[in-house]
Image (cartoon, grey):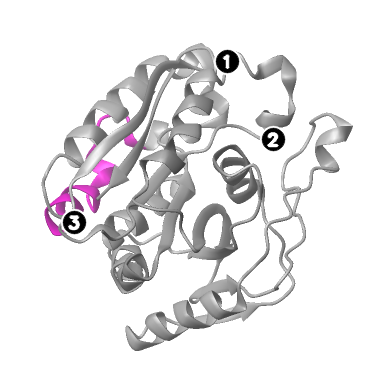
Amino acid sequence: MRQPVYFLSHGGGPWPWMPEVLDAYAPLTAALQAIPAALPRRPRAILMVSAHWITRGGVLLGSHPRPGMLYDYYGFPAHTYEIRYPAPGSPDLAARTAELLRTADIPVDFDPERGFDHGAFVPAHVMFPEADIPMVQLSIERSFDPDWHQRLGAALAPLRDEDVLIIGSGLSYHNLRLFGPGGREPSARFDAWLRQALAPATAAARHERLRNWEEAPAARIAHPMEDHLVPLFVANGASGDGPASLCHHETEAAGGLTVSSFRFD
């Protein structure tokens, strides 16, 4: 069996290292911790497509064998700027991924210096706290074009047969000005549409809905900038004819938000 693909709503900031918020994150914690046991076998590596790495004119791959950390958040407790997630990188996986993308005429290059951002190390830590599975990050492209990122995901699909776990890490709702109770209504409306958009059995059919996401109810309220939605386009592209299923859903996240995560088989 090939590895599944995931789109994960990764939560806010470095929450697993903040005891004061862990109760609020209990549903997400449980969903992430359940993923390893739901895989057909332990993956040999993870390819993480994070909303927090945006590049122009193509994509970049992290290629350092021992990536450092990138604390791309602000105003959090001092100890959260000392977090370490010491998973190794994989120059071999970076090279293989680049080969697939170049074959699909997708511009790609390597970044040998960039560390793991919190869109990558937060969910990875909760899923695989031993940090012993190699992880490579892949950026998203600044146009945020759904068709382009669907094609990117489709080019990555062969990695699933090579025991690579592909994860798109973002948020199904990402409006920092309307977090908490103020986002209750728009997050619920957009999430209901999103779950329906992912109901068809094939990636192509789902993409016909996702590519028109701006027409969804409360779309631009849920995503004033769609960086946190784009990893979903990539994940769906890599899913092929596999169905999508809900692997995390809650209606009171951050005090009132409806958020979801999805698995593609």
Contact (CB < 8 A) between labels 2 and 3?
no
Query: Quadrant location of residue 135?
Result: bottom right
Q: Residues within 10 Å of mark 3 (few under 14, many from 20)?
A: many
Identify the residue at image location x=48%, y=76%. Answer: 58
Residue farthest toward the front in the current orientation of the protein: 41
Residue 174 visible in rendering: no
Q: Secondary structure at mark 3?
A: helix
Residue of label 1:
24
Image quarter in which the N terminus is found: bottom left
The answer to if 43 sits in the magenta stretch is no
Q: Residues within 10 Å of mark 1 (few under 14, many from 20)?
A: some
Which is nearer the eye, 234 or 141? 234
Q: Residue 163, which numbered label?
A: none
Residue of label 3:
203
Q: Residues within 10 Å of mark 2 (few under 14, many from 20)?
A: many
| 262 is higher (above) or lower (below) than 231 | above
Q: Is residue 158 left or right of residue 88?
A: left
Q: Identity of the amino acid at label 2?
A: Pro
The answer to if 213 sits in the magenta stretch is yes
Q: Residue 14, which numbered label?
A: 2
Q: Is residue 112 left or right of residue 140?
A: right
* Sequence-earlier tag: 1 or 2: 2
